[in-house]
Image (tube, grey):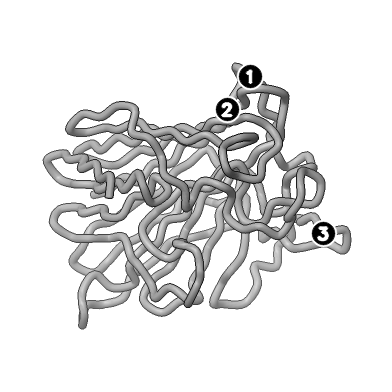
Amino acid sequence: MNAVLLQSARASALLDAEAGGRLTSLIVEGQEVLAGVPRPPDAPDWYRGSFPLAPWAGTRGPAFGPHPSAMHGLVADRPWRVTGSSPSHATLEVDVGPGRGVDWPVAARCTQLVTVRDDGIRFRLEVHSLGEPMPAVAGYHPWFLERLAEGAGPVSVEFRPRHRLIPSQGGSRVAGPDLGERPWDDLFVDLEAPPVIQWPGGPRLTLTSNAAVWVYYERMPGAFCLEPWTGPDNALGTPDARLVTPGDPLSLDFDITWK
């Protein structure tokens, strides 16, 4: 494990560069808030911590390379390189594309900057083209605990979207006011306010991002996901993806702050 420990006076974060540049622990004022759930047999390592999604999120999309149903991008289970670190921040990167052992037609690089402060943690994920223009979507996939300890009260989540992205007949998604039935496994847009997570007797987290889409997943016992994505699933080859060119990367900022 290529582990990097980041610390501030009120928090600590543990990064595992070998496991997809993943945050495996986030302790806020002595309380672990990240979760892991049982991993299905032979499944990829998608069920713990918080990991980056790039150069797409969810499923890939029909119009850019083979294997359109591939999930969660190319970097969630690849080793990242630690390119710099200090007690409170770290930078990481990973390459994809021809000759890099992954199915992506353009030479590209994904970078992360992770910074821990007394009042929060910030992630910046960038997708860079090292060659020709290419579409890209980026995201983060954090798992949060439903309860901070056995016997503790359940989490309270303030999540107020105005619209849900609903699959259309053509395969793309359209925004509609029907938010669907709980438990959710859905994509949402137009939030009334940033999501807030509060545990009884524990920290209160506020999630902010420049992402256009939020995924709320609550169909596993003991944990849930609130994920910022720059675009929906199946977005490559559609206007929902960002066209990345050399010198003009896709950037995703994700902040978790606490009180």
Question: Which residue appears farthest toward the right when viewing the image?
Answer: 170
Question: Which residue appears farthest toward the bottom when viewing the image?
Answer: 151
The residues tagged by marks 3 and 1 sit, at their Cα atoms, a distance apart of: 30 Å
Q: Is residue 169 left or right of residue 128?
A: right
Residue for badge 2:
128
Q: Earlier in the sequence, mark 3 or mark 1?
A: 3
Residue for badge 3:
171
Residue for badge 1:
246
The amino acid type found where label 1 is placed reads: Pro
The residues tagged by marks 2 and 1 sit, at their Cα atoms, a distance apart of: 7 Å
Q: In this view, does 48 lie to the left or right of 234?
A: left
Q: In this view, does 203 lie to the left or right of 107?
A: left
Q: In this view, does 98 lie above or below 233?
A: above
Which residue is drawn at the image coordinates 50% and 72% (left, top)? 42
**Helix, strand or loop at disc 2?**
strand
Whether the residues at callouts 2 and 1 have beta carbons within 8 Å, the answer is yes
Viewer-nearest of labels 2 and 3?
Answer: 2
Q: Earlier in the sequence, mark 2 or mark 3?
A: 2
| Front residue of 205 and 86 | 86
Viewer-nearest of labels 3 and 1?
Answer: 1
**Helix, strand or loop at disc 1?**
loop
The residues tagged by marks 2 and 3 sit, at their Cα atoms, a distance apart of: 27 Å
- Quarter of the image for residue 80 reads top left
| Front residue of 108 and 137 | 108
The amino acid type found where label 3 is placed reads: Gly
Q: In this view, does 243 lie above or below 237?
A: above
